[in-house]
Amino acid sequence: MKLAKLAVAAVAPLAVLAANPALANEQVVVGATVSGPEGNAVGTIVTVENGQAILDTGKHKVPLGIDMYGEGETGPTITVTKAQLDSMMDAQVAEAEAKLDAALVVGAEAMDAEHAPLGTILEIDGDNIVIARGGDEMDKVTLLREHFAVGDHGLMALLTNAQIEAAMAQTAPAGGGASAGE
């Protein structure tokens, strides 16, 4: 029961953050220091584009909608502290890592970034993931663990087949497969 209460408490600041639209967005600019509810610095805005402002807390780069920022006397504000925001991001990263660990197994099918079939995992050696492209064990490519994510459609490489082909063409040794991750 304690665990469930902690989970609800961790999600609550996100709901509060989303429920308070910005009073004025002109303060949301690159380089602005963002303050939390206690007036302490949460981080610095490093990018603003397409309705998003990336907030660098020093530990995480957090994408937040511009409408999630309020106006303060010294600059933009949000309704959570740096510690709360970092904790929420830590939990999201841990969840994503756990999903990736569960999906990256020998025999798993992977798709490319455009949801096209990529191949079957043949081998996992540390951070190196060997894929038989199209199930053909003679057409192998090695990608790094960081090149994968798990989404709604399953295990996905963060590269397209065309990008992998281009990397293989540049690094292909005579008579063998290539590594797109090196």
Image: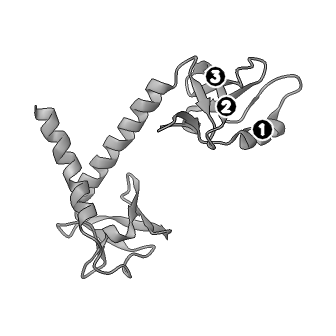
Secondary structure of the residue carrying tag 1 is helix
Question: Which amino acid lies under the numbered mark 3 shown in the image of this protein?
Answer: Thr
Q: Which mark is residue 118?
A: 2
Where residue 40 sits, quadrant-wise, is bottom left
Question: Which amino acid lies under the numbered mark 1 shown in the image of this protein?
Answer: Glu
Give me the residue at 66% from left, 32% from top.
117
Q: Which callout, 1 or 2, points at the residue further toward the start of the chain?
A: 2
Q: Which residue is mark 3?
A: 120
Secondary structure of the residue carrying tag 2 is strand
Give me the residue at 58% from left, 20% from top.
124
Give me the residue at 45% from left, 69% from top.
51
Report the Cα–Cα distance between label 3 and label 1.
16 Å
Question: Which amino acid lies under the numbered mark 2 shown in the image of this protein?
Answer: Leu
Residues at discs 1 and 2 in contact (Cβ within 8 Å): no
Residue 54 in the image: above or below residue 179 = below
Q: Which residue is mark 1?
A: 165
Report x, y in % for residue 156: 57, 36
